[in-house]
Image: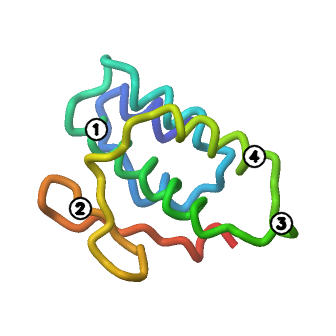
């Protein structure tokens, strides 16, 4: 939340930090993504962060790794249209953001 508050205070959004946070961060990031008081550029980055979390969630298939926060995040992400953020690689470690790669670092979640 502090990263998002700093952004609203005029500082640069640290999207790489947000990608590395757990599924617990998804509700706050989703609210910010849908908040028109954020700049278009920041909302684009927030959308990319959410798309990374969605890609990460899609790779969690073993029931033994189930977490309530990830289930909650998946429900939130399912309600947001992130189709404009597409994965361009086979290993799903990046998505395209305005024609440029935006890197998703899943290992930070483990």
* Picture disc at residue 63: 3
Q: Which mark is residue 42?
A: 1
Q: CA distance from mark 2 to mark 1?
A: 15 Å
The label nearer to you, 3 versus 2, is 3
For the residue labelled by badge 1, is the local secondary structure a helix, a strand or a loop?
helix
Reading the chain from its start, which is encountered first: label 3 or label 2?
3
| The C terminus: image quadrant | bottom right
Q: Marks 3/2: CA distance?
A: 30 Å
List the residue tagged with mark 2: 96
Q: Which is nearer the N-term, disc 4 or disc 3?
A: 3
Secondary element type, mark 2: strand
Is residue 35 left or right of 1 when viewed as pictured? left
Mark 3 residue crowding within 10 angstroms, few (<14) / some (14–19) / many (20+): few
Of 40 and 59, nearer the camera is 59
Mark 1–mark 3 CB contact (< 8 Å): no
Q: Along the polypeptide, which appears first: circle 4 or circle 1? A: 1
Classify 66 as above or below 90.
Answer: above
Alpha carbons under labels 1 and 3: distance apart: 34 Å
Q: In 3D space, how far apart are the residues under numbered discs 4 and 1 (Cα atoms)? A: 24 Å
């Amino acid at each position: 939340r502090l990263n998002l508050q700093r952004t609203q205070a005029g500082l640069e959004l640290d999207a790489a930090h947000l990608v590395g946070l757990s599924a617990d961060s998804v509700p706050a990031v989703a609210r910010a993504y849908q908040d028109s008081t954020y700049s278009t550029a920041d909302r684009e980055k927030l959308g990319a962060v959410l798309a990374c979390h969605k890609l990460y969630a899609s790779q969690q298939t073993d029931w033994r790794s189930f977490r309530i926060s990830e289930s909650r995040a998946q429900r939130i992400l399912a309600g947001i249209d992130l189709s404009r953020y597409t994965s361009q690689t086979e290993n799903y470690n990046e998505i395209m953001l305005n024609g440029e790669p935006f890197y998703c670092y899943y290992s930070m979640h483990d």
